[in-house]
Image (cartoon, rainbow, N blue to C red):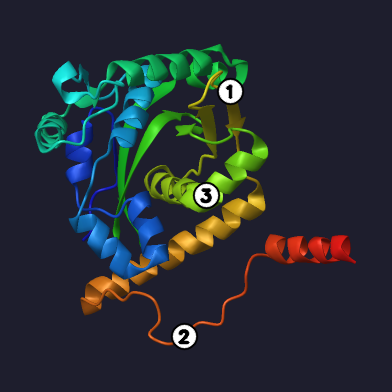
Amino acid sequence: MTLTPQIVYDMDETTYHARPELSSTGVRRLLDSPARFQWDMTHRVESVAYDVGHATHSRILGVGSPIIDIPDEHLTPSGNVSTKAATVAWLAEQRDAGLVPIGAADRALIDGMAEAVLAHPAARALLERPGQPEVSAFATDPETGVALRARFDRLCDDVAIDVKTTAGSAGPIGFAREAARYGYPIQEAHYADVLERITGERHPMAFVVVEKRRPHLVAVHYFDEITRMTARDLTARARQTYAECIATDAWPGYSGEPYTTQVPGWWLDQADEQEELVI
């Protein structure tokens, strides 16, 4: 499918997420396995954790889906969201209406994280640069013919900004681990690829990361060039895989043959250290 490359500044989130083009989330799932991609694309599940992240973005960026307070009858005595069928149905109804349901305790959490981000000098400077929030972009990959989409938290003339919340650490070691686990370098590469096919330019992505636990520490991260180059290669591989799956209507999982697996280097190093202690 070939579509006209374009940047859209006023597309609502529901419309964007309903579109069929390949997203960065799809790319990351394809790199796990095409079978995972196909399943997840047809079994989308929302969660309270997603709602909190979504609402935090809206609070920081000043745009996004409206927040609706969760009534007391859908909360437990401790203030958590109930798991009862009636509550699950009510939450789904609100999300289908384009709203973000949030409990009182989570609203306080969201406000705390937003205030921490805006109090951080580097994060605030980035967010106050001239640019547009919630920017949707669409293009076609010329090598594979795959239609692509991306949605920037904030897009400026020379940098893309992405806001992340974390239950772990926003520091360099913690963010590096989460970036590897959740594929943030792949996200940056995909977004940059889409933008380049529209404007001819690639923007680096600044990740503004805020911790969910108090005092809501904040850090700003950029990936190094080796990480970017590796992610770009992986993203291109995912697009090729997607094109082949579409052409053959086959969505394979993992290999049917046994794997010979090596554990990470840190585990081997740890084993050596323990052996030295015993000796």
User: In the picture, residue 31 is in which quadrant?
Assistant: bottom left
Label 2, on which residue? 258
Q: Residue at x 23, y 46 (%)?
A: 45
Circle 2: residue type: Pro
* Position of residue 216 in the picture relative to residue 44 (left or right): right
The answer to whether 243 is drawn above or below residue 92 in the figure is below
Judged by depth in the image, the label closer to the viewer, 3 or 2, is 2
Return the mark for residue 185: 3
The answer to whether 142 is drawn above or below residue 158 in the figure is below
The answer to whether 129 is drawn above or below residue 198 in the figure is above
Where does the C terminus fall, quadrant-wise?
bottom right
Residue 164 in sight: yes
Separation of marks 1 and 3 at Cα, in angstroms: 22 Å
Characterize the local packing of mark 3: few (<14), some (14-19) or many (20 or more) Cα atoms within 10 angstroms.
many
Secondary structure found at label 3:
helix
In this view of the protein, which residue sits in the foreground, 167 or 32?
Answer: 167
Q: Residue at x 70, y 60 (%)?
A: 266
**What is the total number of numbered labels drawn onto the structure image?**
3
Q: Position of residue 268 (x, y in %)?
A: 73, 67
In this view, the residue farthest toward the bottom is: 257
**Label 2 near label 3: C-beta < 8 Å?**
no
Secondary structure found at label 1:
loop
Separation of marks 3 and 2 at Cα, in angstroms: 29 Å
Characterize the local packing of mark 1: few (<14), some (14-19) or many (20 or more) Cα atoms within 10 angstroms.
some
Label 1, on which residue? 217
Separation of marks 1 and 2 at Cα, in angstroms: 44 Å
* Position of residue 6 in the picture relative to residue 195 (left or right): left
